[in-house]
Image: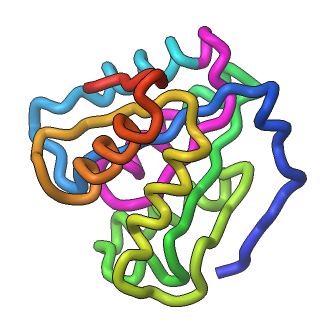
């Protein structure tokens, strides 16, 4: 995978958002509600969206940001990739989505050349540390989404969390 680094954003002036959610989404999950919440954040000054590029909630939220980029030209999608070949075990359909999203992302950040135990948490912390707002779909007490939500709440108690 080719690593792309565009000119860094001036993050002191621009508000940002990160996503966390489950890899498997229930049938009742509303992508329309996700789209509406992201659009509301954009209208309130959020321009940079950090996305962990995992299957499920991450890929769906990245696709919603890309749809909104057509309407709001200042919006940026930053793909935060925990390790090289993150997508190797994805289904063919999700691999295709992953590649298409990466092509359209404004920036790709590769956090590790190799997979290691804990690299997903490093990615999650990286995104949480960059974000002013966390958009979360978390219905479990354990797993990556729960970890990221707890980390964000504890480290940044005054920052906004949008729960879906």
- Is 11 placed above or below 108 here? above
Residue 130, image quadrant: top right
Whole-percent x, y for residue 132 in the image? 57, 29
Whole-percent x, y for residue 90 in the image? 32, 74
User: Horizontal placement of 29 versus 132: left or right?
Assistant: left
- Is 60 placed above or below 142 here? above
Quadrant that contains the N terminus: bottom right
Residue 134, image quadrant: top left
Q: Nearer the viewer, residue 139 or 24?
A: 139
Q: Which residues make up the magenta segment?
A: 42-65
Q: Nearer the viewer, residue 28 or 121?
A: 121
Residue drawn at the location 10% of the way across and 46% of the way down: 140
Residue drawn at the location 89% of the way across and 53% of the way down: 7
User: Within the magenta stretch, is there residue 57?
Assistant: yes
Whole-percent x, y for residue 67 in the image? 55, 32
Q: Nearer the viewer, residue 49 or 34?
A: 49
- Is 8 placed above or below 120 here? above
């Amino acid at each position: 995978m080719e690593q792309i680094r565009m000119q860094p954003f001036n993050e002191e002036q621009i508000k940002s958002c990160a996503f966390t959610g489950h890899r498997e989404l229930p049938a009742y999950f509303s992508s329309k509600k996700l789209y509406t919440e992201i659009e509301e954040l954009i209208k309130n000054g959020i321009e940079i969206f950090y996305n962990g590029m995992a299957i499920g909630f991450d890929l769906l939220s990245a696709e919603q940001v890309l749809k909104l980029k057509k309407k709001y030209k200042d919006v940026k999608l930053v793909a935060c990739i925990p390790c090289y070949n993150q997508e190797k075990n994805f289904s063919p359909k999700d691999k295709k989505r992953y590649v298409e999203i990466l092509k359209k992302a404004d920036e790709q950040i590769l956090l590790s050349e190799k997979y290691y135990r804990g690299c997903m948490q490093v990615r999650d912390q990286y995104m949480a540390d960059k974000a002013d707002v966390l958009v979360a779909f978390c219905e479990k007490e354990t797993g990556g989404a729960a970890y990221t939500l707890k980390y964000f709440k504890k480290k940044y108690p005054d920052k906004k969390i949008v729960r879906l």
